[in-house]
Image: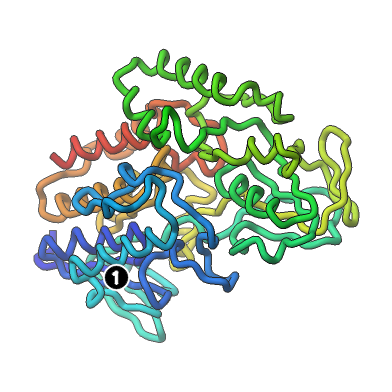
């Protein structure tokens, strides 16, 4: 290892700032590059559509108990599910406590990162600089993934990336495509003002209410971890069936996978709005024809807007595809962090947990510190370790692009803690 190495971090979102905090507080020489004028990443609400941000009424879908950094609890007066504004204030408090702003280069867009002679040359703002290590924390919720269908739609096609508030959709007919958290939240928000709102899903999903037995659903779930997994899944499905009834009662498709085999959709309002006639569930799209959308069951309807809430590509605009391409290839990183070929390249927050990312990003950053201090070593058989890790997840996640990054929050947190300690 290099003595007093120069370390670059790309991105000052929730994952980037915890990487910076862990490195700086352990005496490392680190600089964080942020393309915007403030920290927070997606949690900086902006009306402009060019910036990928939460929308105006966003509240987190994991409880504050399981969304905190490991050594920085959220304020006691925060609700169980803090708002976007409260979370941004929390991130800023974290940065202020550890005096991190002076290590962040704002309004600095890293356009290219090239490995030359085992150093990373970063190109930014018509300048370039060499670093011994590179930590990538630019997030993976900013480059829209949009499916294609036969025919052409004469109305307006949008992606959830562009959704900021529901004002634009007043008195319009809107079809939201997707069954994840963003799709359901947007459908609910749009339906408050739209003339007609539908939601199209290509498969059945499990919808988990935000509260179970009067407590946040992730807190409720954590209390059942002592139960053997198979029995736990049966009890979870039974609890949801008692609370919600059958999905067929809502006109929704029956899920073709188990309750934790896909990324959890945490939403207490979608089913309520369906039963109140505010949202109409639809099957997958078959084709477009003018302002008509035809679904695979033969049903046709007219819409002014089709909003795709269909996820994001895994992209790194500063890397060439020959260097890093996880959109078209498997994730070959150990702990979704350490690269097999570049020992001086690490990723933080490049995962999609059944829970919150930031506590896991904090632990990944702590492990990077241990690695740089030579207090922890990578597995000797790196490829075998990655293979075993990716193929021995506690749940057999469904095979879709987003699930390449999927981990179970509690199991992965336990694993990282055991390695760090």
Residue 25 placement: quadrant:
bottom left
Residue 204 relative to residue 83: left or right: right
Q: How many marks?
A: 1
Residue 171 placement: quadrant:
bottom right
Residue 161 relative to residue 35: left or right: right
**Which residue does the image show at 65% across and 61% down from the upper left?**
166
**Which residue does the image show at 66% across and 26% down from the upper left?**
247
Residue 32 relative to residue 263: left or right: left
x, y percentage for residue 212?
44, 30
Q: Quadrant of the C terminus?
A: top left
Q: Crowding at label 1, few (<14), some or many (≥20) Cα neighbours within 10 Å?
A: many
Which coloring applies here? rainbow
**Which residue does the image show at 74% across and 60% down from the upper left?**
157
Q: Give 341 or 303, whichever is nearer the viewer.
A: 303
* Above or below for 243 versus 263: above
| Residue 334 in view here | no
* Above or below for 51 versus 314: below
Q: Give 325 or 401, whichever is nearer the viewer.
A: 401
x, y percentage for residue 268?
55, 38
Residue 403 relative to residue 25: left or right: right
x, y percentage for residue 42?
46, 62
Q: Quadrant of the N terminus?
A: bottom left
x, y percentage for residue 353?
41, 41
Element marked by disc 1: strand
| Residue 78 in view here | yes
**Which residue has dot 1 on it?**
32
Q: Give 106 or 236, whichever is nearer the viewer.
A: 236
């Amino acid at each position: 290892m290099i003595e007093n190495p120069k370390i670059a971090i790309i991105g000052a979102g929730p994952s980037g700032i915890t990487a910076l905090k862990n490195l700086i507080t352990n005496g490392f020489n680190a600089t964080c590059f942020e393309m915007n004028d403030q920290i927070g990443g997606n949690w900086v609400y902006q009306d402009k559509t060019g910036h990928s941000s939460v929308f105006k009424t966003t509240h987190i879908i994991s409880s504050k108990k399981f969304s905190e950094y490991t050594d920085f609890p959220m304020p006691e007066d925060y609700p169980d599910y803090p708002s976007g504004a409260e979370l941004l204030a929390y991130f800023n408090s974290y940065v202020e406590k550890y005096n991190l702003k002076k290590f962040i280069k704002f309004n600095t867009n890293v356009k290219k990162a090239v490995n030359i002679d085992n150093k990373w040359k970063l190109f930014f703002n018509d300048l370039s600089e060499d670093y011994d290590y590179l930590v990538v924390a630019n997030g993976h919720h900013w480059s829209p993934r949009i499916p294609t269908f036969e025919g052409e739609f004469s109305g307006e096609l949008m992606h959830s990336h562009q959704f900021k508030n529901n004002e634009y959709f007043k008195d319009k007919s809107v079809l939201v495509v997707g069954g994840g958290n963003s799709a359901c939240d947007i459908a609910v928000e749009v339906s408050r003002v739209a003339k007609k709102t539908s939601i199209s899903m290509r498969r059945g999903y499990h919808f988990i209410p935000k509260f179970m037995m009067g407590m946040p659903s992730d807190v409720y779930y954590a209390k059942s971890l002592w139960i053997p997994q198979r029995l736990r899944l049966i009890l979870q499905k039974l609890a949801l069936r008692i609370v919600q009834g059958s999905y067929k009662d809502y006109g929704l498709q029956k899920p073709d996978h188990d309750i934790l085999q896909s990324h959890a959709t945490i939403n207490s309002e979608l089913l309520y709005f369906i039963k109140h006639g505010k949202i109409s569930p639809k099957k997958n799209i078959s084709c477009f024809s003018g302002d008509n959308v035809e679904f695979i069951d033969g049903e046709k309807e007219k819409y002014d807007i089709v909003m795709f809430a269909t996820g994001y590509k895994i992209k790194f605009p500063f890397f060439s595809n020959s260097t890093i391409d996880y959109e078209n290839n498997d994730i070959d990183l150990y702990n979704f962090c350490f690269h097999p070929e570049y020992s001086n390249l690490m990723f933080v927050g490049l995962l999609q947990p059944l829970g919150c990312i930031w506590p896991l990003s904090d632990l990944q950053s702590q492990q990077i510190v241990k690695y740089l201090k030579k207090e922890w070593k990578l597995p000797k058989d790196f490829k075998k370790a990655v293979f075993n890790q990716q193929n021995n997840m506690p749940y057999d996640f469904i095979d879709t692009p987003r699930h390449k990054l999927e981990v179970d929050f509690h199991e992965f947190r336990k694993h990282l803690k055991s390695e760090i300690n």
